Amino acid sequence: MEQDAQLVQQCLQGDGSAWEELVRRHTRRIFNICYRFTGNRTEAEDLSQDVFLRVYRTLASYRSAHGGFATWMTSVTRNLLIDHYRRTRRDRITDSLDDAMPVVENKQSSARRPDELALLGELSSQIQAGLTKLSPELREAVILRDLQQLEYGEIQQVLSVPEGTVKSRINRGRIELARILQQMGVRPS
Amino acid sequence: MNGEPNMNWTCEQTESQLSDYLDGLLQPAERAALEAHAESCARCAPLLASVSALVGNLHGMEMLDTPPRLVYAILDKTLGPRETAVAAPGFFGWLRGIGMPRFAYGAISLSATFLVIASASGFSWRHPKLADLQPAAIARNADRQAHLAFARSAKFVSDLRVVYEIQTRLRQDNEIPTSNEDTVPTTTPNPAPGRTDSGKPGAPNQQNRATAVDRNLQVLATTITSRASLAGVPRIASALCLGSGNGRKNP
């Protein structure tokens, strides 16, 4: 945390290597958030680049007193993901049709790229497919809590909502995801 | 039991507190109440089990590795193309082409052409001299090599012509039968009265013809030997001398 703040200061003084270090430290985490949210590797890579570009441009607005750099960056990521979700809402009209036909959805989830299947494993890929069926509010809450292992306070900061709302979203997100997986015929072990 | 009020939770209460229960955020009494309800509720028991298993799976999901090019793409996008990444191809970019097969084939072809031209111009590889590389020397050497090549070609054609002529003559001679023993019947079916049948009427004539052919061949061999020795093919000439007698002794 302190090291991040120090690197940010060096970046603001024009130190390119400090920025490179920041990128290397956070790329994996940001890429994973983007991938879990979109369920698409290419989109996740593009969004990760957009996140770092925005962070780079707004680095001066970061205040370490308001929280950790990682939390601030996650907040930037979340805002970009929501923007992306709203932009691409039309493309997902077919998704709502798939909701009514879980069998079709199940086939889609099994039609992933082989390298992704190998990467995630069968159960993980099915959970990932279920995640993308959640509403964005519930999805981001579950991702931040259960995949990124953030504390409630950090999630509250990232989402800028009261703690009660955070808890409610996490709870509803988990229950909803469990039901989706059940409809898909997936039984978590 | 422990002085705490006995809480009978509903399904809605249980469902709303499910995550807090799983995250260990409930008070002991609340925890006990939830568990008590879940044990006796056919709807909440499987829900608790499935959500609990799901959370376990979610926590067990490993982070994906960073795509190999992502960090560089981000750095390129933010810092611009890096100096190290740009400067290196600027200075040494042409070296990359050396490893390409197309370049290797081209280089080999060019080298072979140079070798052929240099050899044709009379450049000595064993004793290379700078003077041999002067244009006048190259032209002189090339002219000499061209004349030599022409002379060798002419000689080769001449040799071929001699060999062909010899082969033709020999073939013609072989076609003339040296003995007609096979063609002349040993006995006459109707011998003339008063004439013996033991002689071979054609033999003296054939002998004369063979002698004439042999003589012709010897003359031809002498001619060819003189021509061949002039043309520098002593082997052919000697072979002809040997072959002209058809195994007979030369006079």
Image (tube, coloured by chain):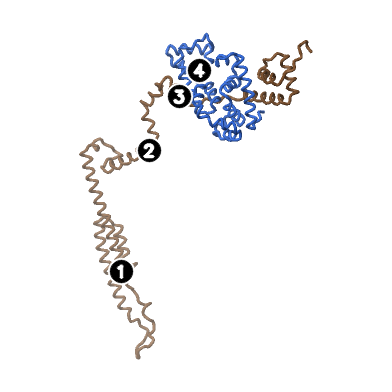
Q: Nearer the viewer, mark 1 or mark 4?
A: 4
Q: Quadrant of the N terminus of chain A?
A: top right
SS for callout 1: helix
- What is the CA distance from the residue labelled 2 to the residue labelled 1? 58 Å
As drawn, A6 above or below A24: above
Give me the disc on residue B73.
3
Kindly indicate whether the residue at mark 1 contacts the one at mark 2 (C-beta within 8 angstroms). no
Q: Nearer the viewer, mark 2 or mark 1?
A: 2
**Residue found at x 79% / y 13%:** B1
Q: Earlier in the sequence, mark 2 or mark 1?
A: 2
Give me the disc on residue A50.
none
Query: Residue B153 placed where, x, y %?
Result: 26, 52
Report the residue marked by disc 1. Answer: B172
Report the residue marked by disc 4. Answer: A76
Q: Earlier in the sequence, mark 3 or mark 1?
A: 3
Report the residue marked by disc 2. Answer: B102
Residue A138 or residue B139, whichever sits in front: A138
Query: Residue A72 placed where, x, y %?
Result: 52, 15
Do marks 3 and 2 both belong to one polypeptide chain?
Answer: yes
Q: Earlier in the sequence, mark 3 or mark 2?
A: 3
* Quarter of the image where one finds residue B99: top left
- What is the CA distance from the residue labelled 3 to the residue labelled 2? 31 Å
